[in-house]
Amino acid sequence: MVNPRLRGTAAIVGVGHGGIGAAPGRSAFDIMADATHAALADCGLKLSDIDGVFSATMVNSMPAVNVVEYLGLRPKVTEGTNTGGSSFLAHMQWAALALDAGLCEVALITYGSNQKSGAGKFVSTSEIVPFEVPYKPRYPVSAYAMAAARHMHEFGTTREQLAEVAVAARTWANLNPEACARGPLSIEDVLGARMVSDPLTVRDCCLVTDGAGAVIMTKADRARDFPKPPAYLLGVAAENWHRWVSSMPDLTTTSASRSGPRALEMAGVGHDDLDLVMLYDAFTITPIMFLEDLGFCPKGEGGRFVADGRLRHGGGFALNTNGGGLSCVHPGMYGLFLLIEAVRQLRGECGARQLDNPQLALCHGNGGHWSSQVTAILGTAATL
Amino acid sequence: MQIEVTAAGPGAERLWRDALAGGQLTLPFCRACGRAHFFPRVICPHCGSNAIELRPASGRGTVYSTTVVRRKPDEGGDYNVALIDFAEGPRMMSRVDGIAPAAVAIGMAVEAKIVTEADGPLVLFHPAGQRPEVEGK
C-alpha cells in the first residue's frame, strides 16, 4: 500500500539550463551555477533563499558539498546520494520530504558536466569492478547491448524497432532549437551506423554532450506565489535491485516494474490520464523496456509498440518531446533534463514542439546499468 | 573439497581467488538454504546466513546473453563479452573463446576453463565439447 501523504505537497517553481551542448572553457561547476542562476531568475528567488542543496556527479566524491561551496551557500540540508542518472528524481523525493518536514524552505536540485569539452570522452568513476572489468565490457553500452540481445531473443524484438526509437526522438529534436542533434535521421541511418557493442550502433546510443540543469522546489502552499505555473509532485517512487549488469536478475525486466505502479498509485492517476511521458533514453532499448515495465504495453511487446511510429512527433504518444538523451542532450547523467522538459511542457513554454494543454507528465529515471529506477508524476494545479 | 568462509578469516572473494589461483573453479554455496550465488560474499544474498562455503563448480554453463565489443583491428580487433549461467544457478560475466565473437549465441552450452592473463587467473568459457586450446602457444 502506497502512502499518499506526500502527494501534491511540493512543487517545482523554477527550472534552468546551462552549457547545453558544448561549454568550452567552463567547468562543470561553472555551468551548474549558470543553470542555478537561470532557475532562480525563472522563479524570482535569490541565491541566498536556497537552504537545501541536492546534487550528484560521477566525478566528485562529495558533489553536493562542492555545490554549496561554489555557490557560497549555508544550507540546512545537503544531500548528495548518487544513484546514477536517476539521482535527481530521487533527490526530488527527498526534497519533498525535507520541505514537508520543515527541514528547509527552498530546495535546489542541480547537476552539470563538461564531459564533452572537458575530457572528450565519457566521464566515469575509477571504481574497480572485480568480476566484470577483466572481460572489458564497454561501459555502459555493453550492459544495455546484452539486454537488447536478450530482448530480441526472448520476444522477437528487431533492430529496426530499436532504430525507430532513435528516429522518433530526432523528429522531436528537430522542433527543439536547444537540441544538440538535429537534421534528418532514417531507420537505415541508424542500422548502418558504426556498430559499438552488438546489436547497438552509435545511433542507438545517447549523445555525449556538456550540459547542466537546475530545479527549484518549494512547498506547494507557497508555489502559487511565483511568476510561473508550478508543477506539482503528485507521485514518486524508487526501487533498486543491483549495481552491475552481471547481478541483474533478469535482463529484460527492471525495477521500473515496481517503481512505476507505486508512483502512479500515489498520484492516483492511470496511464490514459498522462499527456507526456519522459523516459530515460540512454540507448534505444531503454524506452522499449521502460514502456513495458511501466505498464504502457505488456512485457515483450515494447518493440512492436513503438514500430508503428507512434513515438514520432504527431504520432499520438508524446514521448521525450525535447529529443531525449538520443538527440537533445546527454551530459553523463540525464535525469534532471526529464524534469525540466516536463515542467516546460506543463507550463506551455515549448514552442514548436508544445503539446496541446498537457496536465500530467510521467518522468522515469534510470541509473547505473538498469540499476536504480525512479518514477515521478508531475501535474498542473488542475490535477491537485 | 569444500572451503569454509569463516567469520574471522579471509573473505569469500579472497578465498575464491586463492582457489582459482590453485587451479580450482569454485562457487559459493549457503549451507543454510542450499543455494549458490555469485559473486562471492560472506553472507548469503538469498537468506542472509553467514554459513558460506566454496564448492568445486561443475564448470558447465549456458550463454544467457552476449555482445561483440567492436574494436579496431590494430587495437586487437572485436571480442566477445557474455553472461553465463552456471548449471548450479548463478550468473557471471565472462568471455567465450575458441569461436568467432559473433558466433557466440544465447542458449549455447559452454564449459569453463581457467586461463592466466597478465593480471592473473581468469575464468573463460569455450563451446561445450570443444577441446580447450593449448595455453601458451
Image (cartoon, rainbow, N blue to C red):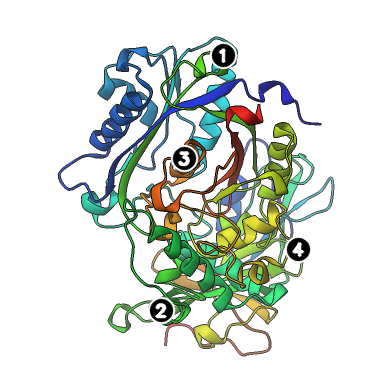
The residue carrying pointer 3 sits among few (fewer than 14), some (14 to 19) or many (20 or more) residues within 10 Å by Cα, namely: some
Residue kind at label 2, given as amino acid type:
Asp
Q: Badge 3 sits on which subunit?
A: A
Q: What element carries label 3?
A: loop
Same chain, marks 1 and 4? no
Q: How far apart are marks 4 and 3 (CA)?
A: 52 Å
Residue kind at label 4, given as amino acid type:
Gly
Tell me the residue at 51%/60% (across/down): A132
The residue carrying pointer 1 sits among few (fewer than 14), some (14 to 19) or many (20 or more) residues within 10 Å by Cα, namely: few
Q: How far apart are marks 1 and 2 (CA)?
A: 50 Å
Tell me the residue at 81%/31% (across/down): A1
Q: Residue A21, position in %: x, y?
A: 28, 52
Residue kind at label 1, given as amino acid type:
Asp
Same chain, marks 4 and 2? no
Q: Is mark 1 on a helix, strand or loop?
A: helix
Q: Name the residue under label 3.
A: A348
Q: Badge 4 sits on which subunit?
A: B
Q: Residue A320, position in %: x, y?
A: 50, 53
Q: CB of mark 1 within 8 Å of CB of mark 2?
A: no
Q: Name the residue under label 1.
A: A221
Same chain, marks 1 and 2? yes
Judge by depth and name the residue closer to the eye, A252 or B74: A252
Q: In this view, does A161 lie to the left or right of B85?
A: left
Q: Mark 4 points at which residue?
A: B89
